[in-house]
Image (cartoon, rainbow, N blue to C red):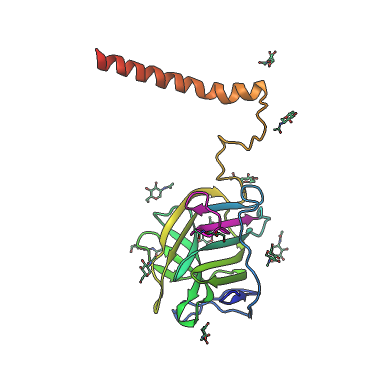
Amino acid sequence: MERGLILLVAALGVYVASGVQGTSYLSFSNNTQVNISQNGCGYTKLCVRTPGNCDPTGNTSCMFASVIASTPLAPNGSAMSFQLSGDSVGYIALGLTVNASQGTTMLFICAQNSSNNGSFFFQTVDQNNTNGALTPAERVTTEIWGIVNENVIKCEFTVPNMNSTTFSILLGTGNITDNGPSPFDISLNSGLLNLTNPASNVPTTAPPVTNTTVTNTTMANSIGAVQPHAVLLLLSVLTLSVMLRA
Ligand SMILES: *[C@@H]1O[C@H](CO)[C@@H](O)[C@H](O)[C@H]1NC(C)=O
Ligand SMILES: *[C@@H]1O[C@H](CO)[C@@H](O)[C@H](O)[C@H]1NC(C)=O
Ligand SMILES: *[C@@H]1O[C@H](CO)[C@@H](O)[C@H](O)[C@H]1NC(C)=O
Ligand SMILES: *[C@@H]1O[C@H](CO)[C@@H](O)[C@H](O)[C@H]1NC(C)=O
Ligand SMILES: *[C@@H]1O[C@H](CO)[C@@H](O)[C@H](O)[C@H]1NC(C)=O
Ligand SMILES: *[C@@H]1O[C@H](CO)[C@@H](O)[C@H](O)[C@H]1NC(C)=O
Ligand SMILES: *[C@@H]1O[C@H](CO)[C@@H](O)[C@H](O)[C@H]1NC(C)=O
Ligand SMILES: *[C@@H]1O[C@H](CO)[C@@H](O)[C@H](O)[C@H]1NC(C)=O
Ligand SMILES: *[C@@H]1O[C@H](CO)[C@@H](O)[C@H](O)[C@H]1NC(C)=O
Ligand SMILES: *[C@@H]1O[C@H](CO)[C@@H](O)[C@H](O)[C@H]1NC(C)=O
Ligand SMILES: *[C@@H]1O[C@H](CO)[C@@H](O)[C@H](O)[C@H]1NC(C)=O
């Protein structure tokens, strides 16, 4: 049986203005699963993870996130549904930023409350990318679900009205202290991605060709485009080695 609470927030997370981090929750239930798998990655959802191609349902440590972002329909922004999974004694978080070394990062934190048997809680903060400082942020977030099992934290949440769909996704962890979340320790920076395109981080040089039958045109494109550089490189290496021998 799973230890930990599942939390469903039917409406919004609200920052408590006292300066202490906080999010108000509207209801609890404690016997549901949060299913986070890699099914559909690259096709129905955009996935980022570290290390490598790790599997969030596997039994090795894997920091994983997926997003399904709707195409914005004026006057509203894009609705984005996130899933996040990873290991931490404190929190795991997903950040959205346009440049991880300047400006701010919107940070969505899924955490366990170690002073309450590892119960789950959710929080939104902004990170100052220059000095790493975290400040509570009021950000409408809906459909928040989370579960903590040992040190594995899994959560889902939806941001209904994002004003942009191009972001770098940051994944990382941190601790929870008496003063709130400690600095965000980034383990992955995806680089800028089009979040509405599930395949935006799938290498375009490796299309999902399942059949070795390649048409002439494809051959011409894939080989023809690469060859001149390869030849030039080869020539320059040869030239260099000739010069070295001379
Ligand atoms: C999670 O997956 C299991 C097995 O596939 C399924 O029975 C269950 O209904 C799913 N739960 C949710 C909340 O989707
Ligand atoms: C992963 O789980 C499988 C099946 O439960 C088990 O056989 C294997 O030893 C586990 N691996 C690790 C690294 O825990
Ligand atoms: C924009 O959002 C509002 C409030 O959620 C909703 O009532 C409206 O239908 C949305 N408009 C479009 C075009 O999606
Ligand atoms: C990000 O910000 C740094 C520091 O301000 C700047 O040097 C860099 O060019 C920026 N990167 C992008 C992709 O804008
Ligand atoms: C914490 O968990 C332990 C064992 O699972 C239980 O005995 C204890 O009552 C729990 N405490 C709280 C505050 O839920
Ligand atoms: C971020 O921190 C830097 C350095 O402390 C400060 O100059 C800047 O004003 C801060 N930015 C924001 C948005 O708070
Ligand atoms: C999105 O909205 C936030 C808050 O209103 C603003 O700070 C930010 O610059 C906006 N981003 C874009 C890309 O418009
Ligand atoms: C969290 O705290 C533990 C022990 O206090 C420490 O080992 C770990 O490095 C901290 N993690 C982060 C991300 O600060
Ligand atoms: C993002 O991806 C969507 C879906 O593939 C596409 O329609 C849209 O034009 C892309 N946007 C940008 C800025 O590339
Ligand atoms: C590749 O495509 C050809 C023609 O469409 C088909 O006959 C063949 O079975 C396919 N091979 C595989 C492995 O799918
Ligand atoms: C395509 O391949 C066929 C058979 O290998 C060859 O006869 C034909 O000339 C090729 N077409 C082009 C455009 O290279």
Q: Residue at x 62, y 80 (%)?
A: 26
- The C terminus lies in which quarter of the figure? top left
Give residue 9's position: percent from left, percent from top.
63, 75
Taking the magenta stretch, the answer to whether it contains residue 66 is yes
Q: Is residue 166 visible?
A: no
Give residue 108's position: percent from left, percent from top.
51, 66
Question: How many labels sit on residues?
Answer: 0
Give residue 192's position: percent from left, percent from top.
50, 48
Direction top: furthest residue: 246
Q: Nearer the viewer, residue 74 or 43?
A: 43
The answer to which quarter of the image holds residue 133 is bottom left
Taking the magenta stretch, the answer to whether it contains residue 86 is no
Give residue 61's position: percent from left, percent from top.
48, 59
- The stretch in magenta equals 49-69
Q: Residue at x 67, y 32 (%)?
A: 211
Q: Is residue 118 left or right of residue 133?
A: right
- The N terminus lies in which quarter of the figure? bottom right
Q: Residue at x 66, y 26 (%)?
A: 214
Q: Nearer the viewer, residue 246 or 170?
A: 246
